């Protein structure tokens, strides 16, 4: 892919539109764009990372794996955001502490370590991007921890469907993917979904969940506070 295509994709993101001419030229020389049509783990725990990862389109899921083999999502990285864990690795010479998976139709830009360090020193927009990534990471991790400690699994599932459902009211995830996010098993998710279907808050299709009654689902999400 040519440099013009690289900048064309990046300029859809506000932060890169504010780069100086010199900064844009550095990206032309060093940026690599990678496109993923399906789910793929692109970083494993313990890997060395050679640059900063910026989501141009789609989304990345950062997750952990328990000793028993269960996955649990730590947080998502959305378009225009940079992976703060990868930045920590390149600034402090560390190995990556988790796993990273792409969603379908995702484009990720990789900025080599030296290029990102130079941009960070000279470009205010990259400095702001880095600080924003840190604050977002802390917020999302705290939000996940709060939900884990204050809500039961049924309510967490209902809230996840509400928050992640598309505009058309459909969440395109398999039961296994939902289980991986919530840190449980597919069998548990299937049982909870059967209950939601019986209460007519959702209906299940192959590889997706459709919201049927928004008010009922919202009530399920709000009734799960642990006491």
Image: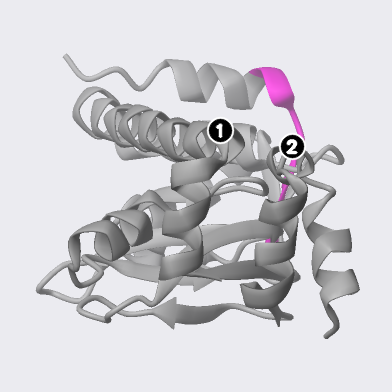
Secondary structure of the residue carrying tag 1 is helix
On whether residue 211 falls in the magenta region, the answer is yes
Q: Are marks 1 and 2 in contact (CB under 8 Å)?
A: yes
Magenta residues, as a range? 207-215
Location of the N terminus by quadrant is bottom right
Along the viewing direction, whichever of 182 and 197 lies nearer the viewer:
182
Where residue 18 is drawn, which disc sits there?
2
Secondary structure of the residue carrying tag 2 is loop
Location of the C terminus by quadrant is top left
- Can residue 174 be seen from the camera position used here? yes
- Can residue 32 be seen from the camera position used here? no
Q: How is the image coloured?
A: one colour
Where residue 124 is drawn, which disc sits there?
1
Q: Residue at x 27, y 55 (%)?
A: 88
Q: Position of residue 68 (x, y in %)?
A: 13, 74
Q: Position of residue 61 (x, y in %)?
A: 48, 60
Q: Is residue 168 above or below residue 181?
A: above
Q: Position of residue 129 (x, y in %)?
A: 53, 38
Q: Residue at x 77, y 56 (%)?
A: 10
């Amino acid at each position: 892919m040519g440099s013009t295509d690289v900048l064309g994709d990046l300029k859809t993101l506000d932060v890169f539109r504010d780069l100086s001419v010199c900064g844009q030229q550095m990206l032309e020389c060093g940026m690599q764009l990678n496109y993923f049509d399906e789910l793929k783990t692109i970083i494993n725990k313990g890997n060395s990372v050679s640059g900063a990862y910026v989501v141009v389109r789609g989304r990345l899921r950062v997750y952990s794996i328990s000793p028993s083999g269960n996955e649990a999502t730590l947080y998502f990285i959305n378009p225009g955001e940079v992976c703060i864990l990868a930045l920590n690795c390149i600034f402090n010479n560390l190995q990556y502490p988790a796993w990273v998976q792409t969603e379908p139709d995702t484009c990720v830009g990789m900025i080599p370590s030296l290029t990102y360090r130079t941009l960070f020193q000279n470009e205010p927009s990259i400095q702001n991007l880095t600080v924003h990534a840190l604050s977002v990471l802390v917020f999302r991790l705290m939000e996940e921890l709060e939900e884990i400690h204050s809500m039961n699994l049924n309510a967490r599932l209902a809230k996840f469907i509400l928050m992640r459902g598309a505009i058309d009211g459909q969440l395109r995830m398999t039961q296994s993917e939902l289980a991986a996010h919530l840190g449980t098993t597919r069998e548990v998710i299937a049982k909870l979904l059967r209950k939601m279907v019986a209460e007519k808050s959702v209906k299940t299709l192959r590889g997706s969940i459709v919201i049927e009654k928004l008010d009922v689902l919202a009530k399920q999400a709000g009734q799960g506070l642990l006491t």
